[in-house]
Image: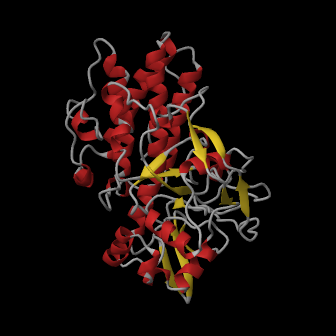
C-alpha cells in the first residue's frame, strides 16, 4: 500500500513555507515505506506509539491548530480529536496513551486519506494567501513537531521489531566502521559567565528561552562520546553488580529489570551483538554507546572517576568548533543503516556533539530563569513536563539534520532507554 502522491502542489504558485511543509510531510511517509500494515499498528510498551498513530497525530496537529482556526472549516472526522490528541487538555479529552495499540480502526489507508485531505487544504492555505505571522509561527511549530515524531517513528518501531523473535529488519543498510577512535581526551574550559539559550534568528522551542547568564566553574569535557568498547569494560568489571556505583533509584531499576547491558545488546556466538534497524549486527567497539538510561550513564561516570556534564557546560563546549555526527536524512541519502556508526572524524574537539546519539546531562529538566509558558494549548507543549526528567543535548542518528541546534533541550525520565541516548564525560 502506498500513500497518495503529493508531489504536485494544489495551487498554481508555491511558497517557501509550502515547500518546507511538503518536504517535511513527505519525509514522514518515507520513514513509513519499509513497514507493513501490521507493523504500523503494534504498541510494544506504554512509551511507544504505533506508527499509524504518529502519522495521524501529526496530521491532527495541523488540522486542529491551523485549519481549525479558519472560519467554516469542518473536521475530517468527529472522533479524531479524541483519538489523536496527545496531551492537550485545553483542546479536549484524549484516548489513553498506553492503549493506542488497541485501536485497529481507523486503518492505515484511512489515515493515509486523512493526511492527504489535510495536506490538500494546508497547501491551499499556504500558497493561496498571505498568512499572519502568528499563524506562520504555528505552522513552523507544527513542522518541528512532526520532525520530533519522525524520530519517534524510528525509535518506537525499533522497540516493536526488537520484541519479535525473528529480529526483523526495518531497512537494509550497511553500518560503516568508525573512521577513528583515539583515546579519550579532556578539553579545558575556564571559569566564567556565559550566556545560555537560544539567541534568536530562527525557530526555537519555548523551553530554549529566555537566553540568560550562568556562571560556570572551570571544567573539563571529553572530546568524544563514550564508545561501546569502553562500556564493555564497565560491564566486565561488574558495573551492573556494584550498588555503590548507582543512584538508589537506578540500582532499584537494575534489580527490578535485571539490566546487564544497554538495551538491544545480546550475547551471540561468544561475543556481543546489537539489534539495529538493519537487523542484528556484531557490536563495534568504536561506535558510540547508545540506548543507555541516565542511571547507566551516571553509574559509568562514577566508575570512570568522572561525572556527566551539566547542560550549560555541554552548550558552552558545543560552541568551540565541534564536528557533527550522522543524522537520519544523511544516512538514508547515503544508503546506510540508521545507527550511530561513528564515521564522523574526531579531528576537531569536542567532536560529534550533534548527531549520532543524544547525550545525557546531569541537569534536571526545569525552566530557565524568567521562563513563562505560552498562553493556551501551546503552554502544554513543554512546560508541564518540567518534573522528574533530565536534559539531553545534541540530537541523534534518528534526528533530521535541520531539526537540531546546540540550544535544543530534549528531556526524558532517568530510566528511559529506547531512544538513541548516549553520553560523554566531564569533570
- The percent position of residue 339, horizontal first and vertical second, equals 58, 61
Which residue is painted at 28% across and 28% down in the image? 76
Q: Residue 327: percent from the left, percent from the top?
A: 61, 50
Q: Position of residue 330 (x, y in %)?
A: 65, 49
Q: Is residue 177 left or right of residue 36?
A: right
> What is the total number of numbered labels drawn onto the structure image?
0
Specify the quadrant of the image occupied by residue 7. Answer: top right
Residue 30 or residue 286, whichever sits in front: 286
Residue 32 in view, yes or no: no
Quadrant of the image occupied by residue 53: top left
Which residue is rendered at x = 55% and y = 81% of the image? 272
Q: Please determine whether, in this image, residue 226 is positioned above or below residue 309.
A: below
Residue 240 position within the rendered picture, expressed as x and y whole percent measured from the top left: 45, 80
Which corner quadrant holds the C terminus? bottom right
Where 260 sits versus 76, above or below? Answer: below
Q: Quadrant of residue 90?
A: top left
Q: Is residue 1 visible?
A: yes
Looking at the image, which is closer to me, 33 or 191?
191
Left or right: where does residue 68 sit relative to residue 233?
Answer: left
Q: What is the image's colouring?
A: secondary structure
From this view, report whether residue 30 is shown above or below residue 255: above
**Foreground of the two, 58 or 11:** 58
Q: Residue at x 21, y 32 (%)?
A: 92
Q: Is residue 396 left or right of residue 81?
A: right
In the image, 44: left or right of 205?
A: left
Q: Residue pushed farthest bottom? A: 270
Q: Residue at x 31, y 39 (%)?
A: 110
Amino acid at each position: 500500500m502506498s500513500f497518495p502522491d503529493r508531489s504536485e502542489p494544489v495551487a498554481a504558485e508555491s511558497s517557501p513555507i509550502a515547500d518546507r511543509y511538503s518536504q517535511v510531510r513527505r519525509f514522514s511517509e518515507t520513514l513509513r515505506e519499509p513497514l507493513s500494515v501490521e507493523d504500523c499498528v503494534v504498541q510494544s510498551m506504554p512509551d511507544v506509539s504505533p506508527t499509524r498513530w504518529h502519522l495521524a497525530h501529526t496530521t491532527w496537529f495541523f488540522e486542529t491548530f491551523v485549519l481549525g482556526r479558519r472560519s467554516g472549516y469542518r473536521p475530517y472526522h468527529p472522533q479524531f480529536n479524541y483519538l489523536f490528541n496527545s496531551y492537550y487538555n485545553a483542546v479536549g479529552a484524549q484516548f489513553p496513551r498506553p492503549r493506542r495499540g488497541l485501536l485497529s480502526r481507523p486503518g492505515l489507508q484511512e489515515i493515509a486519506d486523512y493526511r492527504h485531505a489535510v495536506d490538500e487544504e494546508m497547501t491551499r492555505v499556504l500558497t493561496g494567501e498571505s498568512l499572519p505571522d502568528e499563524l506562520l509561527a504555528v505552522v513552523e511549530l507544527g513542522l518541528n513537531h512532526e520532525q520530533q515524531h519522525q524520530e519517534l517513528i524510528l525509535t518506537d518501531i525499533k522497540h516493536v521489531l526488537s520484541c519479535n523473535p525473528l529480529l526483523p529488519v526495518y531497512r537494509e543498510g550497511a553500518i560503516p566502521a568508525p573512521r577513528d577512535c583515539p583515546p579519550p581526551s579532556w578539553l579545558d574550559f575556564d571559569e566564567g559567565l556565559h550566556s545560555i539559550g537560544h539567541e534568536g534568528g530562527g525557530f526555537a522551542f519555548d523551553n530554549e528561552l529566555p537566553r540568560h547568564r550562568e556562571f560556570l566553574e572551570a571544567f573539563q569535557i571529553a572530546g568524544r562520546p563514550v564508545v561501546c568498547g569502553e562500556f564493555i569494560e564497565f560491564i566486565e568489571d561488574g558495573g551492573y553488580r556494584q550498588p555503590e556505583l548507582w543512584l538508589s533509584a537506578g540500582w532499584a531499576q537494575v534489580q527490578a529489570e535485571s539490566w546487564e547491558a544497554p538495551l538491544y545488546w545480546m550475547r551471540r556466538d561468544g561475543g556481543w551483538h546489537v539489534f539495529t534497524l538493519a537487523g542484528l549486527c556484531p557490536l563495534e567497539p568504536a561506535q558510540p554507546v547508545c540506548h543507555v538510561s541516565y542511571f547507566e550513564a551516571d553509574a559509568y561516570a562514577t566508575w570512570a572517576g568522572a561525572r556527566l556534564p551539566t547542560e550549560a557546560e555541554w552548550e558552552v563546549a558545543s560552541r568551540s568548533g565541534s564536528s557533527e555526527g550522522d543524522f537520519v536524512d544523511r544516512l538514508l541519502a547515503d544508503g546506510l543503516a540508521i545507527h550511530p556508526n561513528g564515521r564522523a572524524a574526531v579531528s576537531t574537539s569536542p567532536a560529534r556533539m550533534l548527531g549520532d546519539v543524544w547525550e545525557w546531562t546531569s541537569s534536571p529538566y526545569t525552566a530557565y530563569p524568567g521562563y513563562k509558558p505560552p498562553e493556551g494549548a501551546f503552554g502544554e507543549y513543554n512546560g508541564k513536563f518540567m518534573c522528574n526528567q533530565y536534559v539531553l543535548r545534541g540530537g541523534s542518528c534518528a534526528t533530521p539534520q535541520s531539526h537540531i541546534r546546540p540550544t535544543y533541550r530534549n528531556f526524558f525520565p532517568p530510566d528511559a532507554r529506547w531512544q538513541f541516548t548516549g553520553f560523554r564525560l566531564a569533570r
